[in-house]
Image (cartoon, rainbow, N blue to C red):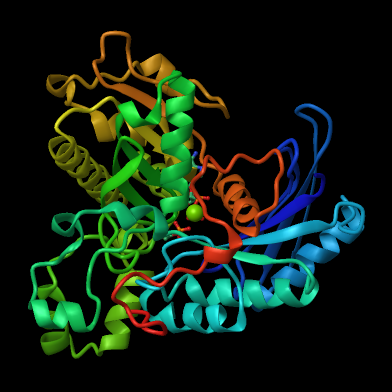
């Protein structure tokens, strides 16, 4: 069958989109709507031509929310193509960050599903609200096609109780569904499969550590294609140092700030989610700016960079130990794909563990998957570009029960069983 799938990947203050041909998996168009809610936002719309050829347009305008961002995206398609009438999407796929205990699989969007995603917003305050706006705008623009929500949390349903449980009061944990859910699962799944494909080995044979280093960042230990450990927790706040998020912190710091600095719970939430990480430490949330400032001698930026690398190395060591044997370390997402300094710094001094980066390979610039370890490294270190949108398109197609060129690899399920409530959990119970 022919047609396309529109994928919307909503973030906190931005969203990415792709229109993907379902027969060929070709990206027909892609774009970024960013700085939503700031004084001036920006839309970048790229139309794919033949081969590597691309036609990019960008413009700046205030974008108060995701709903108006979605309308601007539709205008960009109207003005610059490809025509959404000529390439009418047969389905729309949406990235949703938190699926809680309710969503284990790609799920056809209904009003009840939207309500549940809204209810989970407290646990992903930077992400779920934007996703809901994106879903509502898309449903009114494309009312007659199925919309599918694909959850970041789904890939981590394979964590063992030892990996997903926190050491707190068991009754409270049970009652409030307090556990590690893990995020970036769509990316960790895509990248671990793409790494195996690149190496020409079955994913079932490989033990991998995937480092998704974007604005948000997480590490994932993948054994035989299954997530066995991941650094984000009940919310996308735990783990690595991020652009504006603290990652791991002693929870007693919060009690102390409450008692001594008089900060309330909402202020603490805001502080850790939006005012910490690289931004909190150095005044700069973008890794490029942090590195530039550190190189020109700014002390706080230098320290922020060191803390970022220190934490990354900590997780590499921990996950190596959890896996017991390690075949590959894979860097992905904005920082991981583009920054050689971060990659080298994170793995520096690990030669004793059989991990050796080749400096020349690491410095080489490329947009495709590549090896950056030396030939005598027993662990193969890779850079593999993520493509959450393509993975979402594949899962969306499979969930709608349609057939296309998009591979589902037998992973997502059909529409009839798409919305699954885990055993023992009353429907409507999200957490
Ligand atoms: N060359 C680079 N060096 C360091 N960081 C980079 C580079 N290119 C992009 N980034 C960072 O990548 C991040 C965006 O990555 P991305 O994976 O798109 O994140 P998200 O999906 O969370 O927005 C930005 O914070 C940006 O600073
Ligand atoms: C879950 C998460 O942190 O996503 P992102 O990196 O897109 O902000
Ligand atoms: Mg991202």
Say how many tags the image has: 0
Residue 129 visible in the shown view = yes
Q: Quadrant of the N terminus?
A: top right
Front one among 284 and 6: 6
| Residue 333 vertical placement versus 265 (above, below) | above
Left or right: 127, with 300 as reference point: right
Identify the residue at image location x=40%, y=25%.
Answer: 202
> What's the residue at 42%, 76% (across, down)?
125
In the rendered image, the residue lying farthest to the top is 375
Q: Nearer the viewer, residue 246 or 320?
A: 320
- Furthest toward the front, the residue is 416
- Give x and y (percent) for residue 261: 17, 86
- The image quadrant of residue 206 is top left
Res. 288 in view: no
Q: Residue at x 31, y 75 (%)?
A: 271
Q: Position of residue 45 (x, y in %)?
A: 76, 52
- Which one is in front, 111 or 304? 111
Q: Position of residue 128 (x, y in %)?
A: 49, 73
Quadrant the C terminus occupies: bottom left
Q: Position of residue 230 (x, y in %)?
A: 27, 51
């Amino acid at each position: 069958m022919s047609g396309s799938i529109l994928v919307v990947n909503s973030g906190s203050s931005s969203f990415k989109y792709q229109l993907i041909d379902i027969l060929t998996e070709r990206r027909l168009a892609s774009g970024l709507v960013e700085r939503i809610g700031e004084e001036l936002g920006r839309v970048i719309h790229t139309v794919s031509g033949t081969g590597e050829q691309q036609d990019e347009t960008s413009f700046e305008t205030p974008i108060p929310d995701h709903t108006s961002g979605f309308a601007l995206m539709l205008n960009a398609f109207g003005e610059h193509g490809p025509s959404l009438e000529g390439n009418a999407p047969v389905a729309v796929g949406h990235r949703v960050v938190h699926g809680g205990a309710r969503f284990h699989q790609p799920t056809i969007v209904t009003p009840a599903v939207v309500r549940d995603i809204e209810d989970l917003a407290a646990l992903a305050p930077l992400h779920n609200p934007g996703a809901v706006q994106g879903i509502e705008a898309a449903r009114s623009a494309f009312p007659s096609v199925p919309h599918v929500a694909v959850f970041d949390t789904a890939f981590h349903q394979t964590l063992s109780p030892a990996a997903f449980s926190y050491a707190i009061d068991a009754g409270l944990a049970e009652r409030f569904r307090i556990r590690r859910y893990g995020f970036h699962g769509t990316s960790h799944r895509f990248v671990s499969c793409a790494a195996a494909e690149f190496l020409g080995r079955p994913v079932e044979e490989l033990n991998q550590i995937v480092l998704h280093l974007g604005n948000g960042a997480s590490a994932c230990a993948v054994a035989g294609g299954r997530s066995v450990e991941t650094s984000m927790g009940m919310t996308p706040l735990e783990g690595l140092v991020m652009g504006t998020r603290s990652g791991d912190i002693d929870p007693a710091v919060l009690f102390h700030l409450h008692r001594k600095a008089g900060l309330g719970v909402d202020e603490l939430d805001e502080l850790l989610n939006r005012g910490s990480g690289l931004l909190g430490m150095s005044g700069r949330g973008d890794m490029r700016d942090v590195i530039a400032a550190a190189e020109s001698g700014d002390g706080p930026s230098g320290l922020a960079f060191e803390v970022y690398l220190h934490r990354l190395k900590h997780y590499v060591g921990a996950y190596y130990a959890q896996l017991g044997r390690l075949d590959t370390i894979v860097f992905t997402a904005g920082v991981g794909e583009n920054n050689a300094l971060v990659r080298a710094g994170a793995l520096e001094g690990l030669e004793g563990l059989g991990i050796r980066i080749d400096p020349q390979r690491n410095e080489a610039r490329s947009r495709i998957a590549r090896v950056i370890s030396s030939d005598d490294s027993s662990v193969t270190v890779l850079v593999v570009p993520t493509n959450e949108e393509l993975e979402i398109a594949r899962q969306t197609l499979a969930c709608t029960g349609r057939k296309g060129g998009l591979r589902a690899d037998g992973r997502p399920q059909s529409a009839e069983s798409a919305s699954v409530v885990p055993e023992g959990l009353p429907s409507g119970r999200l957490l």
